[in-house]
Image: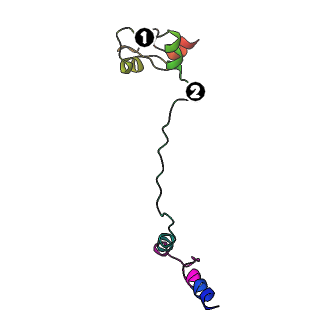
Amino acid sequence: TAVAMTAWSSFTSNTPNKHTTMKQLQTIATLNNIPIEYERRKKKEGWLGKPKGMLQVLFERGFLDTQGKSNKEIVRYYTVNGRKDNNGNKIPNTSLRKLVR
């Protein structure tokens, strides 16, 4: 019938193929009430399921001297292999590896 042919021709003119450009696809989507943009929520990354570091474990067990020190000072004071003074001598109890043992 004529109505069916008209419906079919309008459908095939709005059907994308391999030569359809992005602008044409967006127009076809808009005509068919299909959104061309969507909002995605940012996933907030947390500490759940993440391994703890040596500093965190030693802090929780009370091995670190935190008296009168800020968090930045604590992180800077303790290192994996220990801090050295101006003469190159290791400062005792600043090595996280030795404190873990």
Q: Describe the element under mark 2 as helix, strand or loop.
A: loop
**Relative to the observer, which residue lies in front, 81 or 48?**
48
Q: Quadrant of the N terminus?
A: bottom right
Q: Quadrant of residue 57?
A: top right
**Relative to the observer, which residue lies in front, 98 or 26?**
26
- Image coordinates of residue 71 in percent, x first then y, are 38, 19
Residue closest to the far bottom = 2
Asked if residue 49 is positioned above or below residue 13 in the image, the reply reads: above
Name the residue carrying label 1: 91
Give the residue at x 46% y 60%: 37
Viewer-nearest of discs 2 and 1: 2
Name the residue carrying label 2: 51
Is there CB contact under 8 Å for labels 2 and 1?
no
Asked if residue 49 is positioned above or below residue 26 in the image, the reply reads: above
Give the residue at x 53% y 23%: 53
Q: Answer few, some or many: residues within 10 Å of disc 2's Cα (few below 14, many 20 plus, some between 14 and 19).
A: few
Please report whichever mark, 2 or 1, sits nearer to the chain's N-terminal start: 2
Q: Is residue 38 left or right of residue 15?
A: left
Residue closest to the far right = 1
Q: Quadrant of residue 2?
A: bottom right
Q: Quadrant of the C terminus?
A: top right
Q: Answer few, some or many: residues within 10 Å of disc 1's Cα (few below 14, many 20 plus, some between 14 and 19).
A: few
Magenta highlight range = 10-24
Q: In the image, what residue type sits under mark 2?
A: Pro
Q: In the image, what residue type sits under mark 1?
A: Ile
- Image coordinates of residue 35 in percent, x first then y, are 49, 63
